[in-house]
């Protein structure tokens, strides 16, 4: 994991976006080898036609994937050192040499060239997506008691008000917006809103060790060599599922592509909703109305509360996995490199529920936000899962 020691760590939303493109590129690099498989280009918004393999020539699709991934890692992943890039090159060459024991050089080189051509085409397409996390030029709406305002301790300016204008992978995500809150904002102590906030406050004041551990597990925080750069936690879960289900190359590539679409569009739809509703964070409400000294266990990120950023990405990719494999048990061993025990879940849905509640334990979100965010994200996941890439007449080889 070349990004683990990076300092500073990769920007979360940008890294999700980048791995979204990498997933789509991986699929396109191996697609011609799967009989009946269609390019994603007709299904994705403004995706150009991809380079075509020569139907009369032989390819080794594992090498196409190898070359495409190595190229895309170097093109998309920010903050890589020369040593990181050399490590990627070394892994690519090791795979090439392993394939050479059972494949001719001309086939390998043709496959390598195709993979690299796909990587270049995907990267060039990515340059026009208008991805923007800056708040320069953003004019916030008039402040009301319900409004998000910068939060302690840093009181940082907002991140991502223009993310909604980024080109999504799905036309569906051009306008997707979460439903309104289930009840209105209120400072009345008998109101449902106040009670929702009070739950977050009470959990924070009386947090149990296991609740804090859960909040930390899903936060992936801690800095270089301590945390785990997002989305590597998510990718480790997806990879575990693929390995557990004994997925072959083409199915794995399709799943990485569809979950990658969830990474990018989940962020776009979530941030459109965040800045549309512009809802106050628990830490602000609590310090204003309940306890002036209260702080969230996790540092509150600099953008509005509703809907949930974490769930907005986890819910759609989990739904993609459920549609592909069923609501199967799952093991999350993302932190085995630190010697932490794996977490086992009876189902993908149970894992998603824990990820959602972790943000309540961390003091970042209200319970109603997490519940609605799950439903909102799953609707996107269903849209992604419905993309038909292989003709029903053909099965994955």
Image (spheres, rainbow, N blue to C red):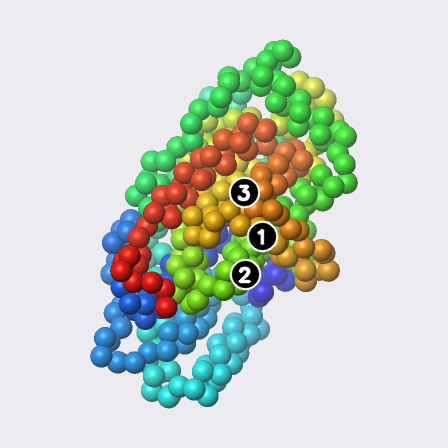
Residue 349 marker? 3
Rendered residue at 49%/54% (across/down): 15
Residue 66, image x, y percentages: 44, 73
The answer to whether 30 is drawn above or below residue 297 in the figure is below
Task: Indicate which disc, 1 or 2, sits on the residue closer to the N terminus.
Answer: 2
Q: Is residue 309 visible?
A: no
The answer to whether 321 is drawn above or below residue 378 in the figure is below
Residue 133, image x, y percentages: 46, 44
Q: Is residue 366 visible?
A: yes
Q: Are marks 1 and 2 in contact (CB under 8 Å)?
A: yes
Query: Does dot 3 land on a helix, a strand or a loop?
Result: helix
The answer to whether 57 is drawn above or below residue 269 in the figure is below
Disc 1/disc 2 C-alpha distance (Å): 9 Å
Q: Residues within 10 Å of mark 1 (few under 14, many from 20)?
A: many
Q: Quadrant of the image for the C terminus?
A: bottom left
Task: Indicate which disc, 2 or 3, sits on the residue closer to the N terminus.
Answer: 2
Q: Are marks 3 and 1 in contact (CB under 8 Å)?
A: no
Q: Foreground residue, 292 or 231? A: 231
Instruction: Judge from the rendering whether residue 75 lies leftward or rightward of residue 346; answer left or right.
Output: left
Q: Foreground residue, 196 or 153? A: 196
The residue where tag 1 is placed is 330
Rendered residue at 76%/36% (across/down): 208
Q: Residues within 10 Å of mark 2 (few under 14, many from 20)?
A: few
The residue where tag 2 is placed is 244
Rendered residue at 50%/36% (across/down): 374
Disc 3/disc 1 C-alpha distance (Å): 10 Å
Residue 289 marker? none
């Amino acid at each position: 994991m070349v990004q683990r020691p990076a300092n500073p760590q990769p920007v979360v939303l940008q890294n999700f976006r980048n791995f979204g493109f990498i997933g789509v590129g991986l699929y396109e690099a191996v697609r011609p080898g799967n009989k009946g498989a269609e390019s994603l280009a007709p299904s994705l918004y403004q995706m150009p036609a991809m380079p075509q393999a020569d139907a009369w020539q032989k390819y080794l699709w594992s090498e196409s994937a190898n070359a495409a991934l190595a190229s895309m890692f170097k093109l998309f992943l920010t903050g890589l050192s020369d040593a990181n890039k050399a490590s990627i090159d070394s892994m690519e060459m090791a795979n090439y040499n392993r394939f050479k024991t059972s494949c001719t050089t001309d086939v390998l080189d043709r496959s390598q060239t195709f993979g690299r051509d796909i990587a270049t085409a995907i990267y060039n397409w990515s340059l026009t997506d208008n991805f923007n996390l800056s708040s320069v030029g953003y004019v916030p709406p008039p402040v009301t008691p319900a409004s998000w305002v910068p939060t302690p301790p840093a009181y940082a300016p907002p991140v991502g008000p223009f993310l909604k204008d980024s080109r999504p992978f799905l036309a569906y995500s051009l306008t997707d917006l979460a439903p309104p809150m289930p009840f209105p904002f209120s400072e009345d102590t008998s109101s449902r809103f106040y009670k929702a906030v009070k739950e977050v406050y009470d959990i924070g004041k009386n947090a149990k060790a296991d609740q804090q551990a859960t909040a930390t597990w899903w936060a992936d925080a801690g800095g270089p060599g301590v945390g785990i750069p997002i989305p590597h936690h998510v990718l480790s879960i997806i990879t575990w599922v693929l390995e557990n289900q004994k997925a072959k190359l083409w199915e794995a590539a399709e799943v990485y592509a569809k979950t990658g679409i969830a990474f990018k569009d989940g962020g776009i739809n979530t941030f459109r909703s965040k800045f549309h509703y512009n809802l106050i964070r628990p830490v602000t409400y609590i310090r204003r109305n309940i306890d002036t000294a209260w702080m969230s266990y996790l540092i509150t990120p600099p953008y509005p509360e509703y809907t949930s950023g974490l769930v907005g990405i986890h819910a759609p990719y989990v739904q993609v996995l459920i549609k592909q494999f069923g609501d199967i048990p799952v093991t999350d061993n993302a932190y085995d490199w630190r010697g932490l025990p794996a977490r086992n879940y009876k189902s993908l849905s149970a894992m998603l529920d824990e990820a959602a509640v972790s943000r309540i334990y961390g003091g970042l979100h209200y319970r109603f936000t997490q519940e609605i965010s799950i439903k909102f994200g799953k609707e996107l996941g269903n849209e992604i899962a419905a993309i038909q890439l292989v003709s029903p007449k053909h099965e994955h080889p």
